[in-house]
Every structure is written in C-alpha cells, then in structure tokens.
Amino acid sequence: MLDFFYLTELFGLTVYDLKGRRLGVVRDAAIVPLVDPVRVDRFLVGGGWSWLTVRHDQVQRIGLDGIWLKDEQLTPYHSDEYMLRLMRDLLDQQIIDSNGRKVVRVTDVTFEILHEPESDVLQVLEVDVGLRSIVRRLLQGGLPRAWIRRLQTRIPPNSIRWEFVNILEPDPQRRLRLNISTRRLESLHPADLADIVEELSPEDREAIFESMDSEAAAEALTEVDPDIQTSILESLDTEKAADIIEEMEPHEAADALGELEEETSEEILEEMEPEPKTEVEELLGFEEDEAGGMMNTRYVALPETATVGDAMVALARHEELMENLNTIFLVDGEDKLTATVPLARLFRASAATPLKELAAETLISVNDGEDQDRITELFDKYNLLTLPVVDEDGKLSGAITADEIISVLRNR
C-alpha cells in the first residue's frame, strides 16, 4: 500500500468511474488553504475538450495505476481564486524556504496518502527542489511509475517541509484568498530576510513588503542594498512606505529618503506622523558623509545632576532603545554635553550614586559637520562604541554608533 505520491506522478494519471470506465486524466490538483492548508481538495480531470472537477470526498482509491471514484456526480471545472493549483501555481515557481533562509525553485511536490476507511486522501507533505525530483520528471512518461521510483532511490532527496514554504504571490487580493501569510518571514533575522529579498524579482519584493508588518519590514529594509532599498520604497503605496520609514531609526530613514527622487521623498514625508517626520527632516539637512547625516537622534540624555536611580527610570521609559544602547549622556541646563556614562558602570553602583562619578574620564565628541574619515579615525583610535555629536553651540544633537561605522567601512 502506497504511503506517498508525487505531483509529477499524479499528472496524467487515469481517473476511472464506478464501473472501471476511463473518465479522463488528471491535469492538475488544488488545495483550498482557507478550508484546509494541506489537503488536496480538488482534482482537475481533462476529458476531451472540457475539464471536470473531482472533489476529495469522491475518491475511493489512489494508486500508481489510477484514481478510482466512488461518486460520479462531477461538475465542470470553473476557475476559483480560492484554489491554489499545484501544477499551475507552484510547480517550477520560486518559493521562499523560511527554514533554510533561501529562495528556491519547486521541481515537484510530495503528498502523504491517508488511507481512510472509505477513501484515500492526499495531503501536501513537502516540496522537492533537488536532483531526484528533476530525474523523476525527466523519466515520467518514458518508464513505468514503479520503475522510476526504484531508480530514484539512488539519489539523495532534497525537499522542504510544507510548513516552511512561503509562496510568492504579487496580487494582494489573491494573497488574501489563498491565506498567504508573512508571519514566518517576519520571524527571520532581518539580515537573513534581506538576503532573501535581494534574490527576488521587483514584483515579489513589493508583494512581501506590502503585506509585512511595518516594524519587521523596516528592520529588513535597513539591511537591504541601497539600490534595492530605493526600488522597494518607490514601488510601495505611499502610505505603506511612510509606515515603514516611521519604524526605522531616524538616520537610517533619512539615508533611505535621501536616495529617492525629491518628489517621492516629499510624498512619503507628508504621510508621516509629525514627530518622526521632524526628526528625519532635520537629518536630511546634512550630507550623508557628515556626522549629522550619520548620527541617530534617539538616545538617552539626563541632567548632569542625575543619579543611577534616575538613569534606571529613564531606561525603563526607553525600553525600545535598550538593544543598541551602551551610553548615557549628561547635559547641563542649556542642553550642552558635559559627560558620557558607559551603561555597564550603572550595574555596579547604588541608586543614589551621582552619574557624574561614573562618567568616562575623557569626553570625546564631534561637531555635526565633521567628515566621515575623521569620525572613523576617532572610533579606531579610542575604541569607541558610541560617539556623541554636538552642534556649533555644544548642544547634544545625536550619537553615532559603531554599527554605523562598520557599515561605512563595509561599503568602501
């Protein structure tokens, strides 16, 4: 008794009625994800000029010798946008393997056969992407199916479990009808997702970013090559582009908008909320290779009279910054930078300890007009993790972090 079946074996398989008469051959099979994400719901059977639809509950037995029905009340096939047709929509198409973090092309589909009391049911088990499935397809029709199965055992399988498959569908309405979700992609590391995105066509990139959560999209977009980043933002609906830009760090958002045509950049800015819009517009006034163009305007600054206890309260209020935060800045009554405090020093001091007592011995900062080469020298010379940026009056404007310098060096 068979336990599995292949899509290429299914194609061309003869379908028989209750009396063993030939009705036609299988031309395609479809799942209806909103009903059941893995069960083959329909078999599309070609007989002469027309196609018929065979429901899964009309099938009695499935084997290499054919499909045998227990119900002959078949209906003509009509296109249904809620159906994912496996031959038409999946075979030879690119998909995303979210487990392997790569883009691959489907060369076959493997089904599991469930032998229920009165019928056989096919469930999609995995998609095949390797040499074994290619050989199987080349030999299909030239040799008996049973022979091909024996021959293929000499080749190692290469497949992806169905639950890790992310189908690419540019049409937003059809994505909805097919219940295509980006949740698994959103859980990938942004750098891995960026690598995947860079392998896709412009249409598929747009489809993914249009449907993704804006925060996850922003993290991924930050990691994408600047040219592709520009292409993605230009392709998106203006409102969606604005939502993504708002979730980016201000300096990264400014860099992205600075690469766009001025008209497009202005349209996106108009859709943004006032606070992030103001932050980004300020940074757009600087050149990309100046300190002002490299700095992040999201930081934690406290009065120079603050204590460790005050710092802990401030850190709790800015939890979203904690992943990249390593320094607290101290400013005087006029917001002029007076000291920097390494975050690690807070955890070995009492709450009443003044932050000034924990400050770095040497205050190193740069003017917002300082050039990129000088900034890189300072990071190298003093082994900095963070470099504060001040304006011409000495007021704190932002901070440049080591990851920004790594990006600069990588792009040279």
Image (cartoon, rainbow, N blue to C red):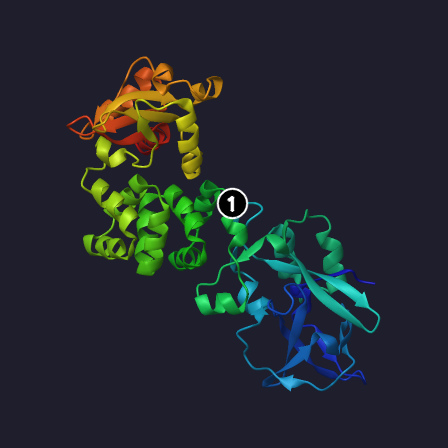
Name above or below for residue 17 compared with residue 156. below
Name above or below for residue 371 compared with residue 162. above
User: Would you say residue 360 is visible in this rendering?
Assistant: yes
Quarter-of-image position of residue 291: top left
* Residue 343: x %, y % from top left: 41, 23
Position of 34 with respect to 264 (left or right) is: right
Name above or below for residue 241 compared with residue 59. above
Q: Residue furthest top?
A: 361
Position of 376 with respect to 199 (left or right) is: left
* Residue 312: x %, y % from top left: 44, 29
Element under disc 1:
loop
User: Which residue is drawn at the image coordinates 22% and 34% (left, top)?
Assistant: 292
User: Which residue is drawn at the image coordinates 35% and 24% (left, top)?
Assistant: 306
* Residue 139: x %, y % from top left: 66, 61
Quarter-of-image position of residue 391: top left
Q: Nearer the viewer, residue 345 or 84?
A: 345
Q: Quadrant of the C terminus?
A: top left
Q: Quadrant of the N terminus?
A: bottom right
User: Which residue is drawn at the image coordinates 28% and 33% (left, top)?
Assistant: 295
User: Which residue is drawn at the image coordinates 67% and 49% (left, top)?
Assistant: 157
Would you call the spot at circle 1 few (<14 residues within 10 Å), some (14-19), or many (20 or more)?
some
In the picture of the structure, the residue carrying the numbered disc 1 is 188
Position of 290 with respect to 99 (left or right) is: left
Q: Amino acid at mark 1?
A: Leu
